[in-house]
Image (cartoon, helix red, strand yellow):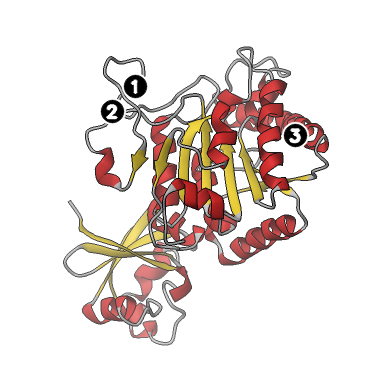
Amino acid sequence: MENTTRSVVASQAQRIVVKIGSSSLTREDGSLNLEAINQLTRALADAHNRGIDIVLVSSGAVAAGATPLNMTRPKTMSDKQAAAMVGQSRLMAAYEIAFANYGITVGQVLLTVPDVIHRKHYANAQHALKTLLGMHVIPVVNENDAVVTDELRFGDNDRLAALTSHLIDAQMLVLLTDVDGLYSAPPTEPGAHLIEKVSGLEDLDGLSITGRGSSVGTGGMRTKVAAAELAASGGVGVVLTSADNVEKALNGEPVGTWFVPSSRHPSARSLWLEHVAQVRGHVTVDAGARQALTKARASLLLVGVTGVAGRFAEGDLIEIKDETGRVFARGLSAYNVEELLGFVGSPRARGQRPVVHANDIVRVRVHKEK
């Protein structure tokens, strides 16, 4: 899609991901706002019936489950998981009833981090979502809060929505919140004005972007902007606006803030590894290994590793540094740190499996460790 104006992207989009937050779906007492769900459903059904594949990333499960459990705001992981177990079925039931009024079937898709970062899981998640879309079903995606851990979670559904947009090769992402767009400062401050378009990171310089928003959500404007950047950096156009503007946003009308998509089109898995996943350690490699990784895009072999640091297990994300300390790649380690230390400098290193397979490596912008 050469023209990246919002009207053109919206008119040509075949797949659109829409994310809505808890604050837009719940009342002040924490119960589900069925009127808001019906308004959202009506707009999505209209786009769906025009032949657009729609994926809905919906928060609200924890909030929906907190009320019947007599919780105010769940704080511990176990409380959040309990609320999610109760609330997810209530949330899906509300969507099923609302979409049934338009003759549309919905399907629940609960994702975890391994579904995005591990090759086999990634392919399975991608196939499942595309199969549902091929059957004209609207997938309703959420993080599987009932089983995730602090170490392996997306952290917020804005980020999950950005990665989902790449997972299904969407052309546009609509992030719905309780404000009508990104402002130069908190909207209540004098002189704050709406930022209508963000073409690159330089457009965000000097802005005062706040953290957590409502009492029922997990993220604020900062997480939404980060998710928008994540999606746009991979070629997905992003609209950030209020839930009341969902229909206008889907139609390409000038509402909220438009994040211009780049020409890059990496996978959701690559974006997660490059920008989001937590690094557990690093390895230092010699000049030959660096050249093989950057020029030939080969696997990282044990013979090229000269140093190891950190505490990581097999499958954890590690940074790959050259001999000057510059990080130039990231990847999933095939060894734990103890195994790796035992091989460095040893003749036994030859003929062993790669430290990081070529399919598990992403190249990152070069920077020097402080």
Q: Taking the image as drawn, is residue 332 in sight?
A: yes
Is label 2 in a helix, a strand or a loop? loop
The residue lying at 34 percent from left, 82 percent from top is 296
Residue 208, numbered circle:
2
Identified by mark 1, the residue type is Pro
- Crowd rating for badge 3 (residues with CA inside 10 Å; few <14, some 14–19, many 20+): many
Mark toward the start of the polypeptide (3 vs 1): 3
Residue sitting at x 67%, y 28%: 39
199 left or right, relative to 121? left
Residue visible at 46% across and 27% down? 180
Q: Which label was assigned to residue 198? A: none
Image location of residue 14, percent across then percent down: 60, 56
Relative to 214, does residue 160 appear above or below in the rendering?
below
Task: List the residue tagged with mark 1.
Answer: 186
Give the residue number, with chain letter if any, for mark 3: 95
Dots 2, 1 in contact, CB < 8 A: yes
Q: Nearer the viewer, residue 331 or 23?
A: 23
* Vertical position of residue 343 compared to residue 69: above or below: below
Q: Which amino acid does label 3 sit on?
A: Tyr
Q: In the visual, does 55 lie left or right of 170?
A: right
Q: Label 2: few (<14), some or many (≥20) within 10 Å?
A: few
Q: Which of marks 2 and 1 is nearer the N terminus?
A: 1
First of labels 3, 2 by sequence position: 3
